[in-house]
Amino acid sequence: MALKRLATKRLAASAFLLAASATGVWAFALKSPDIAPGGGPIAETFVYNGFGCAGGDLSPALSWSNPPAGTRSFALLVHDPDAPTGGAGFWHWVVYNIPASATGLPQGVGKDGKGLPAGALQVATDFGVPGYGGPCPPKGDKPHHYNFTVYALKTDKLDLPPHATASLAGFLINANSLGKASLTGTYGR
């Protein structure tokens, strides 16, 4: 009788795990305590300081979980697809060679990169320098969307040239991607 109950409990637990896996409960996910889920507004603390904007220009804290099996490193891309650039959007932050042991990036690490995990590197953004540059859409535009996407990569390291563009980094990141997780914030002025 006790063995039958134990077998029933194990079967129920297995069914739960299978259902959770099938429904994506344990899917690769990206979260931030600084950006509300579902396209919430980005606070002034994380807005660019320049071009008429007067924000704190701090990168938001990010955390990820449940990367795909075989992940050997991560990369992070932050992009504004609404920027009036003739269709290219605007790159706000690119970080690559983040070790597979990392589970996130602390708030403010994008400023000078000193708090990045060992080996992680930043690419020059469309502001012309490496590091995080916050939102600063043209005054009067509808709120822009800022897509934060972490990629799980199948390689330990991307060998980008010293002056690689964000687009080249994005190309190589996508070519080595096992999966990605995203969150979106909005900002307008």
Image (spheres, grey):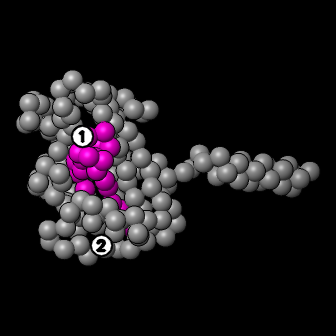
Q: Is residue 180 left or right of residue 173?
A: right
> In terms of depth relative to the viewer, which is nearer, 128 or 112?
128
At 32% from the left and 61% from the top, the residue drawn is 170
Residue type highlighted by circle 2: Leu
**Residue 84 lies in what quarter of the image?**
top left
What crowding class fits label 1: few (fewer than 14 Cα within 10 Å), some (14-19), or many (20 or more)? few
Q: Name the residue under label 2.
A: 158
Give the CA distance from mark 1 to mark 2.
Answer: 30 Å
Q: Can residue 65 be seen in this view?
A: no
Q: On screen, 9 above or below 166? A: above
Q: Residue 97 location, x and y as percent? A: 28, 67
Give residue 172's position: percent from left, percent from top.
Answer: 34, 69
Return the residue at label 1: 84
On the question of residue 29 being in view, the answer is: yes
Q: Is mark 2 on a helix, strand or loop?
A: loop
Task: Say what amino acid the circle numbered 1 marks.
Answer: Pro
Residue at image position (30%, 73%) is 158
Labels 1 and 2: the sequence-earlier one: 1
State yes or no: residue 168 in magenta.
no
Magenta stretch bounds: 73-94
Instruction: Judge depth for marks 1 and 2 and give the one in front.
Output: 1
- The crowd level at tag 2 (other Cα within 10 Å; few <14, some 14-19, many 20+) is some
Contact, CB < 8 Å: mark 1 with mark 2?
Answer: no
Residue 86 rendering spot, x and y as whole percentages: 26, 46
Q: Is residue 159 above or below residue 148?
A: below
From this viewpoint, which residue is outermost toward the right? 1
